[in-house]
């Protein structure tokens, strides 16, 4: 070790002395003494490592305290926090899928901060069931005899398969052996559910006779999976739920349809591509249908199971049901979201996912012009601003082919590269996530609230003024 290295190491301030400084005491008052002590130790460790690696960092107390302040602020930052989604991807899986309706947010806060009727019947004063909070609503909205909700649709599919087809054969079309996000694959989930998968048909075409030929005395389930996140286009054919129901009933075999996105109302009225609704599956006579709560339904992360009374009763009593059950906060959000659907107009207005998907391009365009003007007024010549026709997306592995026409605000930064601007917005106090196209940054008002637009203007102004 050289003399320089040794003297630098010796010059590093001591933890106790740093903690006695007034500015460090102020930091401890904002964060906590434990957090600031950790930040000091980590800062000194990092400086020591730098010195040993041959660097000559500033080791004066003031410099060290400045580094400690930065590290403390970083450590105090919550990991899971709000971001502003300017991408125009409405159900953005990485950004938490659906935003909840305000009424749902309020209900979550109410049950989270107090005791609740989660499993308590106030009429009788006795133990109740957590299923009651959403079961009647799901039945009313879908036409099902019975229903329950679990942790997510992956759990719903697992529970459905384990409950109906464990140690039996389950027939599924080769065109429906999909992978949905990270680690959810139909063949894997069927194996985990204890069913023996029997694949029929070809990737693009499966006929009723393929299912018929595969029926054996060991057949326990006909599974239909909606290919929500991709499309096979061209020379294709699928067997409808109604045909499967007919085949199943001839053999006494139940039909389970994984509908996926949780569409409860026909969105064609608002120009959105056709997606089969949960009610259509029920009307076709399937024994069980499942969907997500936080995709196009616009509620919290959840999996909905609806269908025949005897099937749902069996699933409620299944040992896995407890492992995948919902907590009170999610149930509160789901109940309120479903209640909004009782009035379709109210649902469209108050459920953010539905509202954003159905806002016409003309209305987005008007907002984009005002938004671009506000940025130009606040930031002078730091950015060349404009608006441009573009497309928003449903996201969340739903409506993969649907281009939703939109108008975006375009920004060309004049004093930095567009990638630098993107990074700085993303790393700000409240991260702002935007898209880049060529050398312009795109901000889609479709997924922004007016308050968020104002926050973006402030952030752009701060970046421009640095
Ligand atoms: C999204 C999806 C799933 C998985 O649902 P999660 O709620 O994400 O667990 C399963 N099946 C289909 C058809 C889907 O679209």
Image (cartoon, helix red, strand yellow):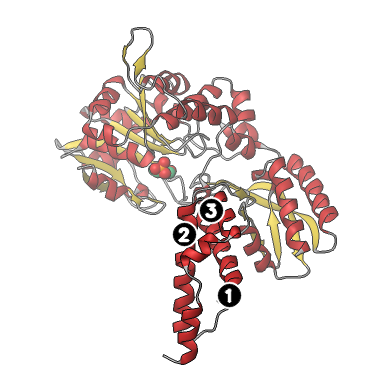
Left or right relative to 40: residue 146: left
Give the CA distance from mark 3 to mark 1: 20 Å
Q: Which residue is mark 1?
A: 60
Q: Point out residue 309 in the picture as x, y percentages from the top left corner.
A: 30, 20
Left or right relative to 265: residue 371: right
- In this rendered view, identify the residue nearer to me: 463 or 297: 463
Quadrant containing the N terminus is bottom left
- In this rendered view, identify the residue nearer to me: 227 or 22: 22
Left or right relative to 140: residue 175: left
Question: Does the rendering let one see residue 42?
Answer: yes
Q: Earlier in the sequence, mark 1 or mark 2?
A: 2
- In this rendered view, identify the residue nearer to me: 210 or 112: 112
Q: Residue furthest top?
A: 124
Q: Quadrant of ligand 1?
A: top left
Picture quarter containing residue 272?
top right
Quadrant containing the C terminus is bottom right
Ligand 1 near label 3 (Cβ, under 8 Å)?
A: no
Q: Secondary structure at mark 3?
A: helix
Badge 3 density bin: few <14, some 14–19, many ≥20, Cα 10 Å: some
Q: Point out residue 358 in the picture as x, y percentages from the top left corner.
A: 64, 36
Left or right relative to 23: residue 409: right
- What label does residue 263 carry, if any? none
The answer to whether residue 394 is above or below residue 73 is: above
Q: Which residue is mark 3?
A: 28
Q: Point out residue 147 in the picture as x, y percentages from the top left corner.
A: 36, 24
Badge 2 density bin: few <14, some 14–19, many ≥20, Cα 10 Å: some
Give the CA distance from mark 1 to mark 2: 18 Å
- What label does residue 37 carry, if any? 2
Q: Secondary structure at mark 2?
A: helix
Q: Residue furthest bottom?
A: 2
Give the CA distance from mark 3 to mark 2: 8 Å
* Residue in the image at 48% along x and 47% along y: 397
């Amino acid at each position: 070790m050289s003399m320089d290295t040794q003297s630098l190491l010796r010059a590093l301030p001591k933890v106790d002395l740093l903690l006695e400084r007034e500015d460090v005491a102020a930091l401890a008052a904002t964060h906590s003494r434990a957090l600031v002590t950790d930040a000091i130790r980590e800062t000194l460790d990092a400086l020591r490592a730098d010195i040993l690696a041959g660097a000559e960092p500033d080791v004066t107390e003031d410099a060290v305290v400045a580094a400690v302040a930065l590290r403390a602020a970083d450590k105090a930052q919550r990991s899971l926090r709000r971001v502003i989604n300017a991408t125009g991807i409405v159900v953005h899986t990485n950004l938490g899928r659906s935003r909840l309706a305000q009424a749902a947010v309020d209900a979550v806060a109410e049950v989270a901060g107090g005791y609740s009727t989660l499993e308590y019947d106030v009429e009788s004063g006795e133990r109740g069931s957590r299923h009651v909070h959403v079961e009647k609503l799901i039945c009313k909205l879908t036409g099902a005899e019975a229903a329950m909700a679990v942790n997510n649709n992956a759990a719903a599919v697992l529970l459905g398969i384990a409950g109906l087809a464990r140690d039996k054969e389950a027939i599924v079309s080769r065109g429906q052996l999909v992978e949905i996000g990270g680690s959810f694959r139909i063949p894997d989930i069927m194996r985990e559910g204890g069913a023996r998968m029997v694949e029929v048909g070809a990737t693009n075409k499966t006929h009723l006779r393929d299912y018929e030929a595969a029926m054996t005395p060991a057949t326990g389930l006909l599974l239909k999976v909606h290919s929500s996140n991709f499309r096979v286009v061209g020379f294709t054919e699928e067997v409808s739920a109604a045909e499967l129901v007919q085949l199943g009933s001839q053999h006494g075999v139940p039909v389970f349809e994984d509908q996926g996105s949780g569409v409860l109302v026909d969105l064609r009225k608002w120009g959105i591509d056709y997606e089969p609704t949960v009610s259509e599956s029920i009307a076709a006579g399937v024994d069980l249908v499942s969907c997500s709560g936080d995709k196009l339904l616009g509620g919290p992360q959840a999996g909905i199971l609806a269908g025949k009374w005897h099937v749902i009763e069996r699933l409620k009593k299944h040992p896995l049901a407890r492992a995948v059950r919902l907590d009170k906060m999610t149930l509160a959000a789901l109940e309120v979201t479903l209640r909004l659907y009782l009035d379709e107009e109210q649902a469209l207005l108050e459920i953010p996912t539905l509202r954003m998907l159905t806002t016409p391009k003309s209305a987005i365009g008007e907002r984009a012009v005002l938004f671009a003007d506000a940025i130009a007024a606040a930031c002078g010549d730091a950015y060349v601003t404009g608006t441009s026709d573009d497309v928003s997306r449903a996201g969340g592995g739903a409506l993969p082919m649907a281009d939703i026409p939109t108008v975006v605000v375009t920004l060309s930064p004049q004093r930095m590269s567009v990638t630098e601007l993107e990074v700085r917005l993303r790393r700000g106090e409240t991260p702002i996530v935007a898209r880049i196209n060529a050398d312009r940054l795109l901000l889609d008002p479709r997924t922004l609230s007016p308050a968020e637009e104002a926050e973006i203007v402030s952030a752009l102004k701060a970046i421009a003024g640095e």
